[in-house]
Amino acid sequence: MTVQQLSTTVIIIGAGPAGAGTSFFLTKYGIPHIVIEKETFPRDKVCGDACSGKTALVINRANPEWLAEILGDAQSFLPSWGITFVAPDGKSLDIPFTLARTQETPAPGFTVPRMVLDDFLFNKMPSPYCTIFQNATVSEIARVGDSVKVTMTHERAIYEVTASLIIGADGDKSMVRKQFSGLDTTPKTYAVGLRAYYEGVTGLSKDNFIELHFLPEMLPGYLWIFPLPNGMANVGVGILSEVVRKKKINLREQMLHAIKTNPQIAPRFANAKLNGKIQGWGLPLAMERQNLSGDNFILTGDAACLIDPFSGEGIGNALYSGMLAAMAIQHAVEQNDFSGAFLKSAYDDVVYKRLGDELRISAALQKLCKYQWLFNFVVKKARKSASLRNTISAMFSNIDLRDQLRRPSFYLKILFNR
C-alpha cells in the first residue's frame, strides 16, 4: 500500500473541545493545521454536561455569532443561572452565578449533552486552514529532527503527516503525552466519575441551577444533578480514585443507593426513568502544576490534566487551554521557535498565570470538603445571611474573593458574624 505524505504547520490529535478551541484560533491566525480524530461525529463523551462562563467566553472570542446561536437554541442548550450546594446534613444553599441579572442579561452558563456540544463545535472547525480526518487510527507519533511525524490510517490509506508542532488534545489517555513527556496520569491526579441520563426527575430549579450534593458517604466527592433540555437530567457522582480504592467503594451501587434512599433525593426520582446506561470515566484533576509542553509539542484539556479539582469542570478549561495554545503557536511560528523553552514561556507560564490561582484554590477546597462540620457550618450561616450568600455568589466571578475560602479568618468572621 502506498504511503501518502502530507505536511502542515500544526497537527492536532483529537477534535473535542480542546482540539476545537485550538483549531478555531489557529484559523483566526491563518495557521495551517491538520486535525486527526479517531471517532466519527456526532459521538458521545461521558461528562457532566455543564458549561461555565469560561466556555461562553472562548466561544464568543472565536465567533460571537456562535455564542448567539447557542443562547438562542433552548431546545439544545439550557441556560443555567446558578448552583445549589447541598451540605452533608441535607441543608441546601442556592447561589446565583450573577447578582446583576436583568431581562437582557445572557445566562452565565448552560448545560448541553456532550454529543450535541462537541458536534456543534466540530461543525464550526472546517476552514481553508483546517483539514480534518475523522475515523482515523494513529499508529505512531515520533519526533524526526526538528519536526514531528504522525503515521495514521484513514479509509484504508496510510498517511505520514509531518509538522513543526503537535497538539495533544486526545484526552486523559493521551498518546502525545505518553510519547513526548514520558508521563501517564498518576493516581494522585485522578478522580473517577459516573454519568447517567434520567428523565422525569422532579424538583429541578426553574432557573436551571445545577446541583451538587455533598453526601457524607461520598466526601470529598459529591453527587450531581444537572438539568438538561427536553426534561432530561444528567445525574452522576465524582470521587477521588484513592478514596474509592481505600474504602473499596462500588461507585455505581453507592450512586443508585443514594437515588433510592436519600431522603432529599429519593422522592425526586420516584417516577424517574434511567435513559441508557450508567457510564464511567477518569477525571485528570489539576491538583498540581505539570509540564504542559516540550520540544515540538503542547498538551491541552484533559491531556494536560486541567480539570478543576473542586467543580470537576473540564469543558471550559479545555476550550480555554486550546485558545492559549493557539496564541502560543502564533508566537512560535513568528519566531520560528518550537523548542520546549520557548513553549514553556509562551504556553505553560501563560496557562498557569491565567488559571493557576483558580486551580490552586479549587484544589484546596476539594481537600476542605472532607470536613463535614465545616461544610454544614458555612451552609447554615449562609442560609441565614443574605450578605454571606452574596459574598459566595461574587466568588464565582472574583478569584480574589474565592481565595478567602482557603483562609481560617474567613470562617472566624462567619463565626462571629463580622
Image: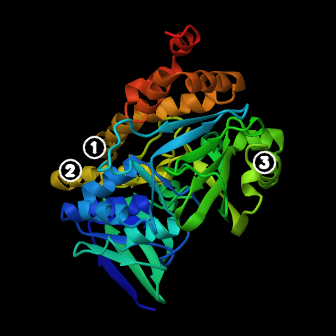
Q: Quadrant of residue 312?
A: top right
Is the Cβ of the residue at disc 1 closer than 8 Å to that at disc 3? no
Dot 1: what SS? helix
Which of the marked residues, 1 or 3, is nearer the chain's N terminus? 3
Residue drawn at point x = 49 percent, y = 76 percent = 42
| Quarter location, residue 211 | top right
Dot 3 lies on which element? helix
Residue at label 2? 331
Answer with left or right where residue 199 lies relative to residue 53.
right
Say above or below: 315 vs 406. Answer: below
For image coordinates 26% across by 59% down, the residue present is: 62
Which residue is most to the left?
334
Q: Which kind of residue does numbered mark 1 sit on?
A: Ala
Q: From the viewer's perspective, is 397 left or right of 140? A: left
The kind of residue on which mark 2 rests is His
Q: Which residue is mark 3?
A: 258
Residue situated in front as seen by the camera: 346 or 127 = 127
Is disc 2 in contact with disc 1, using a CB cutoff of under 8 Å? yes
Nearer the N terminus, badge 2 or badge 3?
3
Nearest to N terminus: mark 2 or mark 1: 2
Select label 2 or label 3 by which is in front: 3
* Residue type, label 3: Ala
Question: Residue 352 or 320: which is nearer the viewer?
Answer: 320
**In front of the other: 184 or 323:** 323
Residue 364 in view, yes or no: yes
Q: Residue 335: percent from the left, percent from the top?
A: 17, 50
Q: CA distance from mark 1 to mark 3?
A: 46 Å
Callout 2: few (<14), some (14-19), or many (20+) C-alpha neighbours within 10 Å? some
Q: Position of residue 300 (x, y in %)?
A: 42, 53
Q: Nearer the viewer, mark 1 or mark 3?
A: 3
Image vertical order of residue 23 relative to residue 248, above or below: below
Residue 346 is marked as: 1
